[in-house]
Image: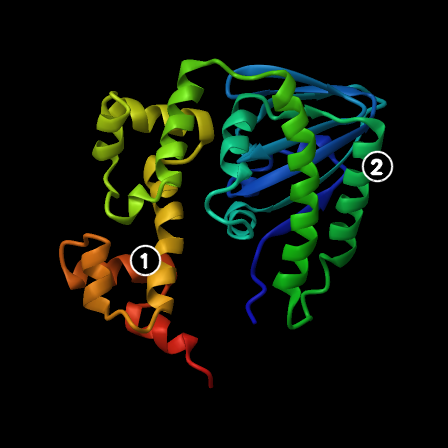
Amino acid sequence: MATDVFFRYSTDFDDMNARELHHACTHMLCLAGEGSFVFNEHCYRIRKNDLVVMPMPDRATCLAAHSDMQVEWFAADYKFLQNLLPSNNYSIGGSISLAQNPVIRLTDEQARHLLGDLHRVRDRMNDRHLLFFRELMGSLCLTLIYDIFEAHAQREATSPHSDRTASIVRQLMALLATGTCRTEREVSYYAERLHVSPKYLSATVKRVTGHSVTSYIDRHAIPILKEYLDDDRLSLTQIAERMHFASLSYFSRYCTKHLGQSPSEYRRSLQPR
């Protein structure tokens, strides 16, 4: 099985925004001291028991740490982490909020749990020789993620966001959660529903989340596509029609792009060997 997924563990705060982390998500826990960084044009100060969750940490600048600052952080490929979770889940709304404020204040108990999660991930990172290394790391990462969800949800319960840009993104996610992307996968459709221009919607989503509107549309559409392909009662032509693809060839290209296989190849991979 392939094990070429990216993982990195470090106790070096100054290395948190290394260039090779551009495709990763970093989870950093401050154990002592104080520090600061700039992210999305805002300066954030951190101290003991602060957790920083930052997609694309290479965008962080002006890192500064007091001499007594101690941190531990773990970074993993962003797509790997996203693929661990269903498309319609708390992580979508959470990622919007974290793009605005990546710092979560933890209780002592939450910090202990997170540090344990980080150490379990760290201790198994070098077991790449195992046949089920990706699955093992995925399980450990999920535990880390859900502990973060819990702390983040408590923060959001006491500090709701009213920013219009965040509201637009949340409305987009709510639309996508209804399954509309089964037949509608153009940015212009969602912009019209939200009464904004496609340019404004694209720029807002990119600025708030760091990802494109299309990536979120596809992220919701792919599970629907897989569900149809898993149903052998449906022909490929029927699936293409149900999902309003303009042609069977375009449907095939879409599958190849997002599944790494043509529809026929994907279905053959489901057959017992």
Residue of label 2: 112
Answer yes or no: is residue 74 visible: no
Residue in view at x 60 percent, y 15 percent: 43
- Image check: 161 left or right of 258? right
Residue 8 lies, in percent from the top left, at: 66, 48
| Quadrant where the N terminus is found in the figure | bottom right
Residue 222 lies, in percent from the top left, at: 37, 53
- Image check: 59 left or right of 271? right
Q: Secondary structure at mark 1?
A: helix
Tag shown at residue 66: none
Q: Residues within 10 Å of mark 1 (few under 14, many from 20)?
A: few
Most foreground residue, 77 or 11: 77
Residue in view at x 29 percent, y 49 percent: 182
Residue of label 1: 257
Residue 138 vertical position relative to residue 127 in the rendered view, above or below: above
Residue 60 lies, in percent from the top left, at: 57, 26
Residue 38 vertical position relative to residue 212 in the rendered view, above or below: above
Residue in view at x 64 percent, y 69 percent: 132
Q: Residues within 10 Å of mark 2 (few under 14, many from 20)?
A: few
Residue at the limit of the structure toward the left, as seen here: 247
**Residue type marked 2:** Arg
**Residue type marked 1:** Lys
Residue 164 lies, in percent from the top left, at: 41, 15
Q: Secondary structure at mark 2?
A: helix
| Pair 2/1: label in front | 2
Determine which quarter of the picture holds residue 16. Answer: top right
Q: Are marks 2 and 1 in contact (CB under 8 Å)?
A: no
Most foreground residue, 45 or 242: 242
Residue 246 vertical position relative to residue 21 in the rendered view, above or below: below
